[in-house]
Amino acid sequence: MSNWDVAQISNFIEQEIAAGHLPGAVLYIAHRGAEIMKQAYGSRVSYPEAAPMSVDTVFDLASLTKVVATLPAVLQLIDQGKLSLADPIGIFLPQFRCLQEEPIRIVHLLTHSSGLRADIPGIKTKMHLSRDELVDLILDEQPLHPPGTKVAYSDIGMIVLYLIIEIVTGEAFATYLKRELYEPLEMSETGFCPNFEPSRYAVTEFSEHHQAYKAGLVHDEKAELMQGVSGHAGLFSTVHDLANFAEMIRQKGVFKGRRLISSAAIELSSRNFTPYTQEFRGLGWLLRNPNSFQFSGDYASEGAFGHTGFTGTSLLFEPEGDLQVILLTNRVHFGRTDHILQMRPRLHNLILAQSN
């Protein structure tokens, strides 16, 4: 631990904030099971008045929902014999009107290889839709290419997976997750449709629809139409709770002596299921790929995996070096710029260089 230059890492983030690339951040680093740093920087809100970020700030995780909610739920259901990666989705959703000759399977949804497009076109003009109307639109979707032939990141596929999880469990997604995952992980401030004091939230983007900055209301429009609960976005959490989740992944499904997910499932999830493309995908996770852009940084090993969220959040696991990095920001508070795409790999390089 004496090799860690926490001041250098902090200075990097403070420079990004000073440059106007993001209002604030919370950074967590754990190495070999020990917490190296957990620190807040900058502001949780800048408009109309600045307020400081803190380590207990609640963040809209955006697409981290896919790996902190949807993925672990699926892995648990596979462990219980209630799902298989090979299951065609039509056996759960017969109303899914897919005309594709090769069926879309659970594995295709998790690896973004279903052929379903990323989004509903013109979603900002459809904010009048009800949840059921949005689901009907999704169930009418047709794949753009045969399943299992191409990776195309798809929120729609993860919404379909969320619908399947509710059918298989016979209960609300949020209810299942709270009992089977978040309570055992002592993630008491993680969930959908949060109800904290306004001062707890990292404020996201200005919404034309609401004529206000979003604080505690999900940033993603599709998740908002889904009444705040979905498989692709909608989850809120804190760095403390995510650190517990990261430790469970590090311990291959065990937290404080209790097994929540099998080690076989954890290991399977970070295996490359898409060797036929330039974007290596595990089950839910984005994997290290030396042939393409890497959010993980230049020094990450082949076994590294993680995920990002559009609001400015990310998780990185480096099993070879026994390192976990959690970066939480509300970069969309300043608008939908791309500065975070350069910041993440450079930050990870700085951290990975010190971890050896």
Image: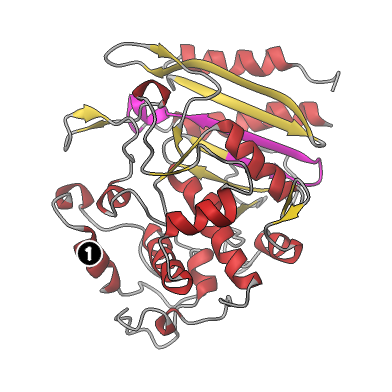
The answer to if 333 sits in the magenta stretch is yes
What's the residue type where badge 1 is placed?
Answer: Asp
Q: Residue at x 30, y 81 (%)?
A: 95
- Tell whether 141 sits left or right of 31: left
* Above-or-below relation of 72 to 234: below
Which quarter of the image is occupied by the C terminus?
top right
Q: Residue at x 66, y 32 (%)?
A: 348
The region drawn magenta spans 315-336
Q: Position of residue 302 (x, y in %)?
A: 74, 51
Q: Residue at x 53, y 33 (%)?
A: 238
Query: Which of 290/198 is in front?
Result: 198
Q: Position of residue 201 (x, y in %)?
A: 40, 27
* Above-or-below relation of 69 to 314: below
The answer to whether residue 302 of the structure is visible from this angle is yes
In which quarter of the view is residue 35 placed? top right
* Above-or-below relation of 76 to 45: below
Q: Position of residue 242 (x, y in %)?
A: 59, 39
* Above-or-below relation of 57 to 190: above
Find disc 1 in the rendering and name its residue. 132
Query: Which of 245/337 is in front?
Result: 245
In which quarter of the view is residue 21 placed? top left
